[in-house]
Each structure stands twice: as C-alpha cells, then as structure tokens.
C-alpha cells in the first residue's frame, strides 16, 4: 500500500513575533488542506512533530491542529517527539498508519516557536536532548558537542575549516532562492572562512557561520493512501524510508563513524531499489556544517575523510551530479526543531512536482531526505519520487 504526498504548506522561518505556536500550527494546517483540495472531515489522523522542551508553556499541543478547521474535530491527533527529527518522526508515524490500513488521509504538521525565550535558555533546552547525566549535566551543549566532532574530524583527516566554510557559503547562496529561508543572504566563502567579530568562534573549530539558526516556523503535509489519490492534481510517492536509532550516550559510540545515518541511508536506498547516483538532489540535516560534511560520507557520496572532494568537484552544488540542500538547508533556511523534518519533505515534494521556483533542480525525478535527532542518535531517510 503506497503513501503519497498530495498537499503541503510552509511558513517563513525566522523570528516571527506576530505568530505564536497556535497560529503557526493553524496556518499551515489550513493551507495544506487547501493545497490538497481535501475536506478537513476526510482526515483520518493528525500527527504533530514538536520538541518544545520549554520553548513555550504549552505542553499539550496536538489538538491545536484542530483550531485550523472545525471539520477536524474528533480526529485523533498525536504529538510526536524525537529531538531534531521530530518532524520526520511525525511523517513516518502517519505513513505507518496509512500502510497499516488505519488511515486513508493524514495531516502531518511540524512546528516550533523557539524565539520566545532568550538565547541561553535555547541552548539549555537543546542541550537536554543529549544524554543528560553524562553530557548536558556536565555543561555540554550541542555546539560544544559538534565542535568536538569537528575537532576529531580535523585530527583524523586534516584541517578542514575551509571545507566547512564552503558548505556554509554554498547553503547561504542557495538560501537566497528560498522564499521561506530565515537568512536570504549570500555571505560568500571569504566571510564564512574568516573568524571575525561578526563571525566569532563558537565551539572547537566551528564559527558562527557553521551553526544553524534559531528560528520559529511550521510546515505541513497531507498524506494519502495511493489508492485514494483520485483526482489529486499531483502526488509524490514515498518510495522507501528507513529509521535507525543508536545509543543515546556518546560514551557508547564512536561519533565520528556516523553509523546511524550510514545505516539509514543504506536501508532506504536498498528499499527504493536504487543507488545514490539515481538521486536528483538531497536535503540533509546540516544543523552544523560538520554534519553535512559527514553526511556526504555516510550516504556514500565520498569515502571517509574525503567529503571535501565533493565540494572541490562541484558535485553538491546546483548543477552538480547531486545537489545537496538546494533549499539552503538548516544553515540558511533555519531550524525550528519540530518543523525541520516536515519542511525537508515539503521542499523535496516541491522539487519533484516541479514547483520549487528559483530553487528548482532541473528534471528532478528522485530525491533523498535525511533528518537527524541528536548527534546521530535518531536517523530518518526518505526516498521520494513523483507518482503523478
């Protein structure tokens, strides 16, 4: 039983002072249903991806989706949380229900309101998505964690600060073409590669331009059993998907191996019956530039320690053999936690439908999405294709 995306919606990402969490959720829910031309009463289940953790006081949010339309009243609604992969977790939960025959149409929403608290509190909340007793409780933050990861990569494979700067510059240049991106400014390689007052060192070798943005935002998808898509004006099929979870404590893993993402990519590609060379583009989880670099190697685009080669030969740039993050990625688009995984699927669907505007990858036929929770703890990979 196939699952198809038949509608979507997306807010701008950024500091959205005029929208609270409820407004973010209701807006994309209403717009996605309209985009799919689906009556709210026909929705069989709702899944909301959201971390929260203290960003807002509301901790019981699933039924806020019902605020979008009275026709959603009585529809079962569930909030899904898996750290920064909460959005993909919600997408996968809805797919599970459809594939099990328990739902024909599903509404998936990802939303986060992050800017209502001060920066230090954002850092504390995100740090609590680690193994708290060994990591957050000892002062470890996610910039600190990925800074250590970058330091370990440099120690093993040589100094790669310029490589990380090239990833940041690429994604900021791509983000200029994304109407929803938090930062639509081409910062250029020289700025990203220079430590300065405006681009200070954050943790380890990571500079400010190596770190994703703290953002508000929401995105939504309407999913359907492929047998029910009827007169839908377009449909994007979930050809294959894979979820892999690793141990939470860093002390039980060799983080530099990125083994969870590697396994998730391998399983999803095998399930899709295709190879990496068959993909037209990929949206990957670049919470920090080192994460995108390691993703090149985890997905099989480069051998360990050789991810820089794919920047040098142009593979991951627009017009390359496999453009990575044509949306600008989390780096430029922003990273409202619960919205991220849903947003990545929206943008992939738009590419495959030929509706990505200035971001469009020519003749996009097959796309990959990688959304990650924590430091390679929860890894979700989807392979999507156009069905109609």
Image (cartoon, rainbow, N blue to C red):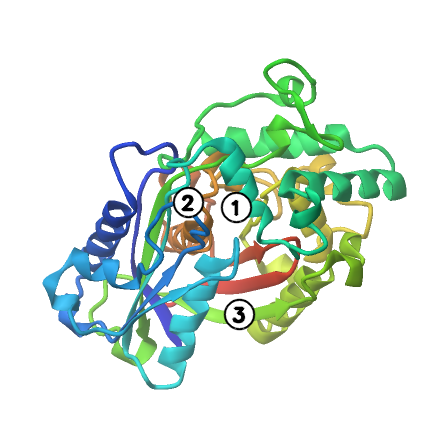
Location of residue 14 in the rendering, given as x and y in whole percent from the top left corner: 39, 34
Q: CA distance from mark 2 to mark 3?
A: 30 Å
Q: Residue at x 68, y 42 (%)?
A: 139
- Which mark is drawn over residue 55? 2
Residue 380 vs residue 179: left or right? right
Name which of mark 2 and mark 1 comes first in the sequence: 2
Q: Which disc number belongs to residue 125?
A: 1
Give how far apart the Cα atoms at labels 2 and 1 are.
Answer: 8 Å
Q: Residues within 10 Å of mark 3 (few under 14, many from 20)?
A: many
Quarter holding residue 325: top right
The answer to whether residue 218 is left or right of residue 316 is left
Residue at 33% from the left image edge and 38% from the top image edge: 12
Quadrant of the frame with the C terminus: bottom left
How far across and how far down the image is residue 68, in percent? Answer: 17, 56
Between 290 and 49, the residue placed more toward the observer is 49
Quadrant location of the N terminus in the rendered image: bottom left
Secondary structure beneath label 1: helix
Q: Is residue 326 visible?
A: yes
Q: Is residue 205 left or right of residue 96?
A: right
Q: Are marks 2 and 1 in contact (CB under 8 Å)?
A: yes
Nearer the N terminus, badge 1 or badge 3? 1
- Horizontal and vertical percent position of residue 166: 67, 30
Q: Is residue 68 above or below residue 47?
A: above
Which dot, 2 or 3, sits closer to the camera?
2
Quickly name the residue at label 3: 241
Residue at image coords 22%, 52%: 26
């Amino acid at each position: 039983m196939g699952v198809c995306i038949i509608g979507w919606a997306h807010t701008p990402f950024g500091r959205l002072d005029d929208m609270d969490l409820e407004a973010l959720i209701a807006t994309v829910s209403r717009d996605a249903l309209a985009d799919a031309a689906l009556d709210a009463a026909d929705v069989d289940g709702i899944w909301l991806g959201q971390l929260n953790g203290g960003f807002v006081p509301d901790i019981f949010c699933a039924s806020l989706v019902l605020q979008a339309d009275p026709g959603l009243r009585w529809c079962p609604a569930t909030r899904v949380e898996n750290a920064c992969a909460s959005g993909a977790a919600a997408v996968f939960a809805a797919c599970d229900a459809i594939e099990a025959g328990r739902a024909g149409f599903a509404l998936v929403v990802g939303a986060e309101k992050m800017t209502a608290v001060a920066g230090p509190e954002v850092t504390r909340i995100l740090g609590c998505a680690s193994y708290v007793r060994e990591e957050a409780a000892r002062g470890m933050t996610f910039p600190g964690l990925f800074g250590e990861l970058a330091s370990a990569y440099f120690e093993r494979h040589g100094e790669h600060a310029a490589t990380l700067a090239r990833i940041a510059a690429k994604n900021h240049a791509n983000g200029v073409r994304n109407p929803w991106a938090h930062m639509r400014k081409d910062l250029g390689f020289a700025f990203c590669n220079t430590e300065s007052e405006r681009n200070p060192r954050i943790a380890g070798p990571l500079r400010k331009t190596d770190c994703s943005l703290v953002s508000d935002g929401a995105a939504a998808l309407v999913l359907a059993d492929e047998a029910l898509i009827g007169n839908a004006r377009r449909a994007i099929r979930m050809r294959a998907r894979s979820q892999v979870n690793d141990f939470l404590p860093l002390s039980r893993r060799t983080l530099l191996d990125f083994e969870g993402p590697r396994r998730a990519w391998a399983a999803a590609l095998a399930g899709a019956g295709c190879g990496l060379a068959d993909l037209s583009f990929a949206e990957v989880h670049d919470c920090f530039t080192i994460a995108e670099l390691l993703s090149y190697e985890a997905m099989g685009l480069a051998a360990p320690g050789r991810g820089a080669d794919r920047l040098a030969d142009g593979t991951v740039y627009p017009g390359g053999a496999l453009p990575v993050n044509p949306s600008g990625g989390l780096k430029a688009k922003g990273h409202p936690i619960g919205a991220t995984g849903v947003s990545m699927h929206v943008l992939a669907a738009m590419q495959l439908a030929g509706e990505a505007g200035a971001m469009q990858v020519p003749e996009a036929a097959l796309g990959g999405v990688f959304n990650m929770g924590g430091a390679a703890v929860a890894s979700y990979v989807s392979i999507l294709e156009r069905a109609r």
